[in-house]
Image (tube, helix red, strand yellow):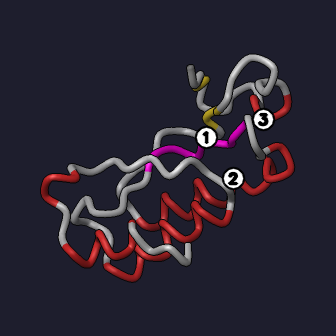
Amino acid sequence: IFFSLCEWGDEDPATWARPVGNMWRTFKDIRNEWNWILTCLDYNDQWHNYAGPGGWNDPDILEVGNEVLSLAESRSHFTLWSLIKAPLLLGNDLRNVEDLIMDIIGNEEI
């Protein structure tokens, strides 16, 4: 069982959630807007030392492939979430993903 805690980071779960869960939300719900994605990223930075095997900071799902972000923004979003050790949970419909987006998702170098 993988247990995800969600209280939107209000009580700084990165500091206490590891004994009771495997993943904890660190901030408010993501929006499919590049500036908001950067806000989530910036806020999550303070918790990087708490992430690791068995416990992960979750700045929310990926917006890659949801038809609002540019291709460059989608690449950056996926790469940045990887760099901060965030769960790579896709928030799109995989049945209708464009090949360019699948290239981002399937990039073995990331």
Taking 98 as reference, is 81 above or below it? above
The reply to whether callout 1 and callout 2 are in contact (CB within 8 Å) is yes
Q: How many marks?
A: 3
Residue lying at 56% horizontally and 64% vertically, measured from the top left:
38
Indicate left or right for 83 with 90 as reference.
Answer: right
Cα distance between the residues tagged 2 and 3: 12 Å
**Amino acid at circle 1:** Phe
State the image quarter where residue 56 is shown.
Answer: top right
What residue is at 62 percent from the left and 59 percent from the top?
Answer: 41
| N-term-proximal mark, 3 vs 1 | 3
Quadrant housing the N terminus: top right
Give me the C-alpha separation between circle 1 and circle 2. 7 Å
Q: Which residue is mark 1?
A: 27
- Local packing at callout 3 (Cα closer than 10 Å; few below 14, some 14-19, many 20+) is many
Pinpoint residue 16: horizontal percent, then vertical percent: 83, 25
The answer to if 1 sits in the magenta stretch is no
Q: Compare marks 2 and 3 and give the one earlier in the sequence.
A: 3
* Residue at image mark 2: 43
SS of the residue at dot 3? Answer: helix
Three-letter amino acid code at the position of disc 3: Ala
Residue nearest the observer in this picture, 27 or 20: 20
Q: Residue at x 78, y 35 (%)?
A: 14
Seen from this angle, which residue lies furthest bottom? 72
Q: Position of residue 15 (x, y in %)?
A: 85, 32
**Residue drawn at 61 percent across, 40 percent down:** 27
Which residues fall within the magenta stretch? 55-61
The residue at which mark 3 appears reads as 14
